[in-house]
């Protein structure tokens, strides 16, 4: 297992939100972290991306604690798209995407041909090529979200961590994003994403991790995890599980 | 392409202002005799050019560049275009230290003044750092800095009221002036130039810090270390400038902001360009201050405040 946690407790201001979690994240899968608000899914994701320092235990990358690995080296393995993005002033789209190459460039940040090729490619994949010369601050919310995704992809890491990436997107862009994640997964990336929409997770992800009150309640294949009992105990939701007529994945319908 | 032409124009303006500053003043020196006046001891304008205008221009060039660079570093770290070394209370700390020195030791050697100012600005920075702690938010840092700056300023006012001796000297120094600055002051400034390459070395991590701590960390930046280094360099730059010229207000605020409009927010372009803009602004301010009513001179700090204060208000109103 490349990414795992050992007895991990983490939170804010001395208060643990994630409590004593031992977790191995399966490689090569699209993994969804699910759970009600405040269950600790975003906190866990941030700890995996070394944005939060564990109170107890540790996050390990290939058996080594994250803080023992040089930051720049780790930045070539794990990339994170946080939930909210700042709006940087006076930065062009192509420059922002190029910042994603920082873990590979020298002290002045000069990009070489390989960097340029990757920047070009991720801008095409995310459909923002025609925005290259525009300022990030002048884009719409949905466009901006795709630009930030492109920057994260330019980091070219085997692991991609996303915190509710579809939140500010129109429905068509949400679907596009989930398809893009699928393609990236087929190219070999492991994707770990916090999602709000259970049906979206069930349809596009291979492995669900369901959390409640800082603990992992259940994990595994969507068809194994999503049950009437789980939805009731975790989300306090009376719902039936049906089969998605197109994807044949489980789908919950609220009663 | 746009970037190259920006740098070309800024460089050209700098050169133009250097020459204009050499030519004009209480005495006008013809353009074709400038080189001769600089090199030849017997030239009637030799003293004006070599001892007076030339070192003063170089000081204006360096101080303008360094204060603007300090402002760009602070704005890069605080992530707020309203921030500047004035806001951190560093300049006012230096001012307070100098006024204390001048009022309590009126007979002491004036040569010590730069070092006292230097001590004051470093103390002000340390007080700010001690109050805010290593992990403070940028907003807390800025608000604490503003409060401290106001405190230092009122201490200065108080001292001037109760100890009106030597007040002229202190007043002149406090408004920020290039008057009477020559080779001696220039040589005091030179060692601090090493801070410029150190600041440029931070261009790439400053870009990433501009994206917020989450992105910066995820991209492999040690955010706290970069912040500390950038602020320390900014304090050093400000301290050395204030020590030579007194606090020249608004330069560190206005120059980086103007530059961001010209060349964008990438620090690889922003940092060098803001040094040129700062140099241009101070050379221009000093040119106007010297030539508006010769031989009487206004302090350059008053000129920068005349331009800077309305600009600051406009920024403040615009950012709601």
Image (cartoon, coloured by chain):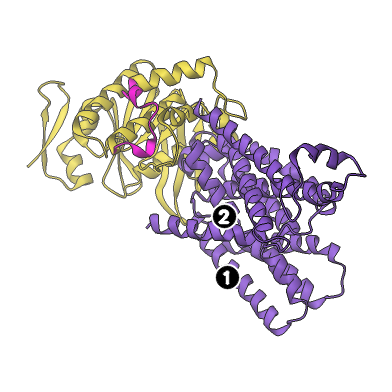
Chain colours: A yellow, B purple
**Magenta-colored stretch includes residue A144:** no
- Dividing the picture into quadrants, the one containing residue A242 is top left
Label 2, secondary structure: give it: loop
- The span shown in magenta is A125-140
Circle 1 SS class: helix
Q: Chain of mark 1?
A: B
- Residue A97, located in which quarter of the rendered image? top left
Q: Is residue A131 a member of the stretch shown in magenta?
A: yes
Q: Which residue is mark 1?
A: B150
* Residue A112 image offset from top left, x and y in percent: 55, 18
Q: Nearer the viewer, residue B304 or A253?
A: B304
Which of the numbered marks, if any, corresponds to residue B301?
none
Residue A217 horizontal side relative to residue B147, left or right: left
What's the mark number on residue B84?
2
Q: Residue at x 32, y 26 (%)?
A: A30
Q: CA distance from mark 1 to mark 2?
A: 14 Å
- Residue sitting nearer the eye, A234 or B183: B183
Q: Which residue is at a point 80% across and 39% down the rendered structure image?
A: B33
């Amino acid at each position: 297992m490349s990414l795992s946690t050992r007895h991990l407790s983490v939170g804010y201001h001395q208060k643990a939100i994630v409590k004593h979690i031992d977790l191995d994240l399966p490689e090569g899968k699209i993994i969804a972290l699910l759970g009600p608000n405040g269950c600790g899914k975003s906190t866990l994701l941030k700890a995996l991306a070394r944005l939060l320092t564990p109170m107890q235990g540790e996050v390990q990358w290939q058996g080594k604690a994250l803080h023992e690995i040089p930051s720049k080296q780790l930045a070539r393995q794990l990339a994170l798209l946080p939930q909210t993005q700042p709006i940087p002033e006076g930065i062009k789209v192509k420059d922002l995407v190029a910042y994603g190459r920082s873990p590979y460039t020298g002290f002045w940040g000069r990009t070489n041909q390989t960097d340029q090729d990757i920047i070009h490619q991720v801008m095409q994949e995310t459909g923002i090529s025609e925005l290259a010369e525009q300022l990030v601050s002048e884009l719409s919310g949905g466009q901006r979200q795709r630009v930030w995704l492109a920057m994260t992809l330019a980091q070219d890491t085997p692991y991609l961590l996303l915190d509710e990436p579809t939140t500010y997107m129109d429905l068509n862009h949400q679907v596009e994003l989930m398809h893009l994640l699928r393609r990236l997964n087929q190219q070999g990336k492991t994707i770990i994403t916090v999602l709000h929409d259970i049906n979206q997770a069930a349809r596009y992800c291979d492995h669900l991790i369901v959390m409640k009150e800082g603990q992992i309640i259940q994990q595994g294949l969507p068809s194994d995890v999503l049950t009437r009992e789980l939805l009731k105990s975790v989300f306090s939701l009376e719902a039936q599980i049906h089969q998605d007529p197109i994807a044949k994945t489980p789908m919950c319908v609220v009663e | 392409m746009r970037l190259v032409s920006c740098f070309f124009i800024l460089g050209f303006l700098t050169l133009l202002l250097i020459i204009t500053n050499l030519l004009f003043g209480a005495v006008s020196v013809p353009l074709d005799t400038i080189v001769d006046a600089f090199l030849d001891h017997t030239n009637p304008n030799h003293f004006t050019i070599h001892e007076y205008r030339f070192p003063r221009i170089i000081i204006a060039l360096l101080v303008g560049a360094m204060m603007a660079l300090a402002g760009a570093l602070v704005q890069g770290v605080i992530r707020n275009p309203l921030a500047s070394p004035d806001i951190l209370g560093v300049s006012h700390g230096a001012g307070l230290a100098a006024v204390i020195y001048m009022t309590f030791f009126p007979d002491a050697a004036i040569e010590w003044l730069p070092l006292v100012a230097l001590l004051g600005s470093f103390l002000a920075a340390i007080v700010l750092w001690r109050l805010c702690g290593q992990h403070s938010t940028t907003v807390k840092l800025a608000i604490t800095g503003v409060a401290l700056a106001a405190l230092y300023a009122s201490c200065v006012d108080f001292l001037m009221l109760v100890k009106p001796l030597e007040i002229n000297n202190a007043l002149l120094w406090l408004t920020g002036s290039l008057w009477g600055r020559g080779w001696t002051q220039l040589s005091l400034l030179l060692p601090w130039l090493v801070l410029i390459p150190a600041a440029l070395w931070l261009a790439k991590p400053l870009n990433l810090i501009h994206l917020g701590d989450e992105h910066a960390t995820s991209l492999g930046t040690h955010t706290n270390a970069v912040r500390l280094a950038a602020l320390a360099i900014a304090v050093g730059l400000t301290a050395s400038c204030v020590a030579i010229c007194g606090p020249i207000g608004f330069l560190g605020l206005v120059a980086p902001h103007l530059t961001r409009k010209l060349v964008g927010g990438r620090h690889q372009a922003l940092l060098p360009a803001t040094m040129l803009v700062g140099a241009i602004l101070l050379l221009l301010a000093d040119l106007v201050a010297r030539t508006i009513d010769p031989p009487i001179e206004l302090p350059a700090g008053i000129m920068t405040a005349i331009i800077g204060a309305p600009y600051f208000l406009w920024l403040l109103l615009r950012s709601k």
